[in-house]
Amino acid sequence: MANKIVIKSIAYGLSLVYGISFFNYLKLSLLYDVQVPALFVAILFACLFLSTLGVAWFQISAVRLLILLNIIACLYIAGFYIYYTHTFFVPFTYIVATIFLVLFFNQPGIKNFSQDVKKNLRKSILVVDDDTSLLKTIRQILISNGYSVLSATTGEKGLQISKNQRPDLIILDVLLPGMKGREVCSKLKAEDRTRKIPVIFLTAKDSPDDVKAELAVGGLSHLTKPLNSKALLAEIKKTIG
């Protein structure tokens, strides 16, 4: 599968070609006998130019649009040149280029890569809690608000996921089976890979001493159970946007 640099290079190279083609056909549209068809081709190249910029930013809809517009432009330009120049040379070269582009951008790998990039643009949140029903509730709330969600039911698993996935934020319970939440947070802050991940404690323990202990191990803030979705979302947005 083509990597990110190759896709961007091809997309920006195409945007340059399409931009130049747009101005060429725009000038050609000033000629009376080819005014309307040349203007239509100019508009096609303007759309192709915009779609390649979308492809450079890995928008899957832009990939589909680029393929469709190339097919339309190829067919229209072929007819345009055949009618006005009575030659197949330019259409043939453009047809070959179009076939190459369609085959390249229609690869499953390109589409998957675009979808993966889009997915990775979403902020990821790890929720560590042994209450599976609460995990499900929080997951639904976060996904519906545009976040990507990871989950763990033990401190050990949460620590492992944090090291491997490095989420943008961790929501952590204190009372967990095995390794407790405060110990998890302390270990996260001791590791270079996870030190900067903000941790919000969500727990039933709400005494001043409990809150002080959570902040002492590196917790950013404290929320108390039962879950208040508005307070949770407000704290998340304040922390990671």
Image (cartoon, rainbow, N blue to C red):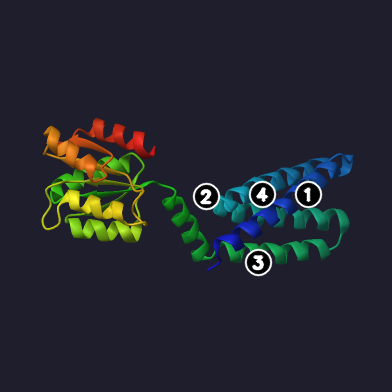
- Distance (Cα) linking label 3 and label 2: 19 Å
Earlier in the chain: of badge 3 and badge 2, it is 2
Name the residue rendered at 20%, 60% in the picture: 156
Quick check: can you spot residue 88? no
Which residue has dot 4 on it?
Answer: 48
- Distance (Cα) linking label 2 and label 4: 13 Å
Which residue has dot 3 on it?
Answer: 100
**Which mark, by number, is residue 20?**
1
Earlier in the chain: of badge 1 and badge 2, it is 1
Q: Element under label 1?
A: helix
Image marks 1 and 2: residues in contact by CB distance under 8 Å: no
Which amino acid type is shown beneath numbered disc 3?
A: Phe
Earlier in the chain: of badge 4 and badge 1, it is 1
Which residue has dot 2 on it?
Answer: 61
Which of the two residues, 36 or 12, is positioned nearer the viewer here?
12
Image marks 3 and 1: residues in contact by CB distance under 8 Å: no
